[in-house]
Image (spheres, helix red, strand yellow):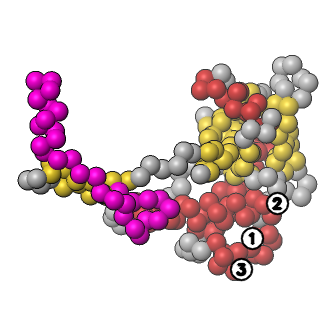
Amino acid sequence: MLRDVQVTVVGKAFKPNPNKVSVLNTALNEYSRLVKWYLGFNSKSKLFLHENCYERAKKLFNLNTALIQTARDKAVEALKSFEENNKGNSVLRLKRISIRFDKRCYSFSKTANVLTPYWLTLSLNKRERISLPIVFGERQKQRQRIEEALNGEWKFTTVEMVKRNGEWYAHFVLKKAVELADEPETVIAIDRGELNLAVAVAISKNNPDKPLKGQFWRGEEIKRIRGLYS
């Protein structure tokens, strides 16, 4: 059985020049305004927001279309999470927003540069595209996971650009399918009786509606075996 496994690898933008930092800061402000704008419609339906807000968003916000759509997704996720966890009359307030890039608006590559071999290119709007050197720590095998992804062992999905304490970090979300062993037969009932010490019944994964033949553990037999070693 194949199951998707997902990991997040965090890298840091290595000494980006002031102009690139300014461009990122401007994009973050615009993206934050857009997420809050979507939240103003108080809808958890991506379809509703796309059909009723997408064209207006393209005119109102200076972001490329992919970022406009990921901002919509973030707004829906934030609203769902808030409603699931809200226990009182609190108001939804976003403390921190990261910019989500999907494969339509970013690329990542490894170069021959010895000091900064890893480069992340981000498309922010129709006119602005920036490239950032990314460094990875050895802790928790960050660099190893990235190398595996570049070799095709993992699939790059999204990148979250997070600003923390004035520094920019890239959170790479990687995914791959792994083979899991077939699930064992599951015990669905156990009973104790006078003649039989225990009875167990299981079901088959391939035919869950038809229980398998039960297993009986007779008390007399258990006593006999116990007597051999007592």
> What amino acid type is highlighted by mark number 2?
Asn
Q: Which disc number belongs to residue 98?
A: none
Q: Name the residue located 72 percent from the left edge and 49 percent from the top edge.
A: 157
Alpha carbons under labels 2 and 1: distance apart: 10 Å
How many C-alpha atoms fall within 10 Å of the one at disc 3: few (<14), some, or many (≥20)?
few
Alpha carbons under labels 3 and 2: distance apart: 17 Å
Q: Which of marks 3 and 2 is in front?
A: 3
Residue 19 visible, this angle: no
Q: Where is residue 172 in the image (x, y as percent from the top left)?
A: 69, 41
- Report which quarter residue 13 is drawn in: top right
Q: Which residue is denoted by mark 2 in the rendering?
A: 64
Q: Which of 169 and 140 is in front in this view?
A: 140
Tell me the quadrant of the picture where the C terminus can be found: top left
Q: Where is residue 205 in the image (x, y as percent from the top left)?
A: 47, 59
Q: Nearer the viewer, residue 96 or 74?
A: 74
In this view, 220 is above or below 145: below
Q: Does the magenta stretch include residue 154?
A: no
How many C-alpha atoms fall within 10 Å of the one at disc 2: few (<14), some, or many (≥20)?
some
Q: Name the residue located 52 percent from the left edge and 49 percent from the top edge.
A: 182
In this view, 5 is above or below 134: below
Q: Name the residue located 61 percent from the left edge and 37 percent from the top edge.
A: 164
Q: Which of marks 3 and 1 is nearer the N terminus?
A: 3
Q: From this viewpoint, which residue is outermost toward the top?
A: 114
Q: Position of residue 2 (x, y in %)?
A: 62, 51
- Report which quarter residue 154 is drawn in: top right
Q: Name the residue located 30 percent from the left edge and 57 percent from the top edge.
A: 214
Q: Which residue is denoted by mark 3 in the rendering?
A: 51
Q: Earlier in the sequence, mark 2 or mark 1?
A: 1
Q: Which of 199 and 10 is in front in this view?
A: 199
Q: Which residue is denoted by mark 1 in the rendering?
A: 57
Magenta stretch in the rendered image: 202-230
